Amino acid sequence: ILRQRFCHQRLPEKPMGIESQHKHLLELLRRTAVHGESNSVLIVGPRGSGKTMLLKCVLRDLLEVKDVNKNVLQVHLNGLLQTDDRIALKEITRQLNLENVVGDKVFGSFAENLAFLLEALKKGDRSSSRPVLFILDEFDLFAHHKNQTLLYNLLDVSQSAQAPVAVIGLTCRLDVLELLEKRVKSRFSHRQIHLLSSLSFRQYLDNVILQLSLPPDFADAKFFEEWNDSIKNVSEVLHQVSVCKPSIKPTDLLEASRVCVADSKANILHGLSVLELCLIIAMKHLSDIYEGEPFNFQMVHNEFKKFLQRKSQSIYNFDKPVVMKAFEHLQQLELIKSVDGSTGKIHKEYQLMKLMLDHNQIMEALQKYPQCPTDVKQWALSAFG
Amino acid sequence: MAGQLLQPGYEENKLQRVSKLLPCRDVQSSMLLALMGEPEQYSYPSIFIYGHRATGKSHVIHTLLKELDIPYATVTCVECVSLGLLFEQVLFSLFGPDSATLLSRSPSLSDFVRVYKQLCVQNPAKQTKYIVLDRAELLRDMDANLLPAFLRLQELVEDNVTVILLSEIVWDKFRPNTGCFEPLLLHFPDYSKDELQQILSEDSHPSYSTELYSAFINILLGVFYSVCRDLRELRHLAALNFAKFVEPLESGKVNESETHKLWRNIEPHLKKAMQTVYLREVSSVQWEQQMEKEAGAVRGLSAHGHVELPYYSKFLLIAAYLASYNPARTDRRFFLKHHGKIKKTNFLKKHEKTSNHLLGPKPFALDRLLAIFYSVVDSRVAPSASVFSQISSLVTLQLLSQVGHNDQLDAPKYKCAVSLDFILAISRTVSFDIVKYLYDFL
């Protein structure tokens, strides 16, 4: 059951904390469905704030009203999938089962389909046609289509007194209205529902405990203690814990939080060979000395050779091609990136690169690196002070 | 070291077999099993696994999925130059060979989702399906909507499916601009030296004892560990060099227990191997032949010090090198017989930090090249067409590279593309001391 809640995102019976938005939206849609009034609304909120959940709850509640269920048509579009107006139009005609759909294929060109659709929507007036709900997920991606024809036409229909149409958009960008063209924006009713997660820690805590409250009660008491230790990514920790362990224990919680919070770049640095690590330290020195200017392989190799002459007893003097191979491995891991991005005519060794790592990340990784030779460590610490 | 992989819903003996196939990866495989849960349960919509090359990411996933008979589709993104190939492979693996024909000629993501939903309705299944995408960093370069869509695939198709992404590069570099559904991140740590030893010792030669092989692996790791930790490369090197290692044993000179002598025998070979086979300059076949013959230097791919050039071409190349790496204002000092004094101003002193050898070759005009050439060649040479044709043949050999527009026929610019070692070797053959003329070595 927990799995279904977290993994499958099943709808709760009642959405928590957003009752006012829920009521607002429900009212709006009811007006379209029952009274035949056209509307458009935009639901805005950051990722994971429950927009899709809200919409699904509202739809479910709406469809419980019996006469609504028979009448209302729904069209679900997603910005990620329908990347083009043509594809979107085909999808609409397919979902509405209009007459020019035979089996799966949709005949006719884009212009014809659009005209047909508009005609079909226009013919009905308030009393005899069925209300249609257009739900546009990832609304901001639709705004990137050419000329925004789809948006324009849908909102146009919703403004003129023809078939009752409700256009509901979901997006995560707060500035989505800026993306719309002027003619589209003017047809939009500027109704927005914001879902900003302004829950305090306590409220969030209660929410979470409610979600997890199916297992026996002793788990709750233990949770209370654990939360008082600082845990940063609370929701991620929950996901990890509930999914991984069949029985929840406090130690598991701490372990999971450690796993989530771990810096992934430091993990990658952990796996590099000693030679590559020396190269990274050399690059770091170069960036410090020249204050962030990009470097190339020759300079790094020079710096490395200086270190070998001065100090090292443990590192063997490798040939230049071997060092080059280590350098290319670092490039493949995207720890260094070329500055101008063109691999054109410049010889491989002289191409300018930038280091994508931070000072602190390198120092942390050095601490955790297993069996790091001491002179390498000292070299790293030497010029930083 | 067979760890305990316990998970309800799967048979005991299957799990034991899996843990035997995956040495040193118990923690990760148990975590993955816990994530997958029982076959009918839902699993998290997307998982992102990252780790170095050859840390066993694909191996672990494929072993788990295959041994436990879970329906899955695996796609390597390198092979999918178009989206259609990706979609076809997924549908083929999950729903059988007929399903791929339902897609149109160049399907979009929308078509894929639609066909998937249709097929789900036709063949309903309760078990979790898995889609494994290898080398997932290439997904970033394909259509921008592909990666976010795959992360949310469970939601979009409304089916019990989980997408697993495998990559070397960390997740921070994957995130699209407006954010996306965040997958669960799993890290596969690199093998430590002991673990590498353990894994490599597992494939020992049948006719020799395992202790001998372990000793060999120990020596190999000692030489190569600080350079390379890639399991595949080490395995390759071990396979190639083992024959050489046991050679004294076969010829009866040395006993098995005298590892010191064996070490002394093999060490120079391993060092040579580092320069050649590790860098892929010599193919493995050539290396094996070399081992048998034991004579002569190994000719690598980039050993073009053996390139034979005519006399004047060598001087042209030397002149080009000098033109590339000396600043133009110092030409007068080097090449004129009676030059005046050159004042070193403050301006010069500030910019002398970075030597030209670090920055790379600079372009020069044809006139400058010829001027230096005439002063460098000791005999008198007339400016005939053969000199000019030698310049263009140097360009074809890629020892010089042409810079700038092809239209500039009367004043072409060139750059010298050879390294210092190469030019030193060449100037030695014509007994010309180039170091005297290089500004950086003053």
Image (cartoon, coloured by chain):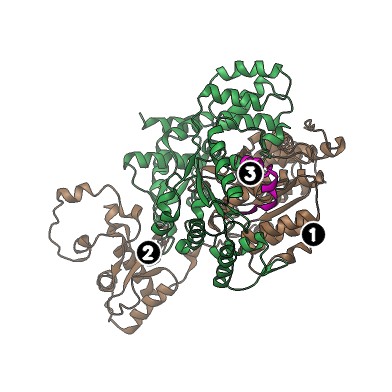
Amino acid under label 3?
Leu
Amino acid under label 1?
Gly
**Which residue appears farthest toward the front when viewing the image?**
A127
Task: Point out residue B22 in the picture as x, y percentages from the top left corner.
Answer: 75, 40
Secondary structure at badge 1 equals: loop
Few, some or many residues within 10 Å of mark 3 (<14, 14–19, 20+)? some
Query: Can you tell which chain is drawn brown?
Result: B
The prevailing secondary structure element of the residues shown in magenta is: helix
Mark 3 vs mark 2: tell me if same chain.
Answer: no
Subunit bearing disc 2: B
From the image, tell me which residue sits under label 3.
Answer: A59
Q: Nearer the viewer, residue B322 or B85?
A: B85
Amino acid under label 2?
Ser
Horizontally, is A201 left or right of B4 in the view? left
From the image, tell me which residue sits under label 1.
Answer: B96
Task: Point out residue A110 in the picture as x, y percentages from the top left corner.
Answer: 56, 70
Q: Does the CB distance between marks 1 and 3 fall below 8 Å?
A: no
Tell me the distance, in whole angstroms, between the alpha carbons under discs 1 and 3: 36 Å
From the image, tell me which residue sits under label 2.
Answer: B427
Q: Nearer the viewer, residue B415 or B75?
A: B75
Q: Nearer the viewer, residue A57 or A121?
A: A121
Query: Can you tell which chain is drawn green?
Result: A
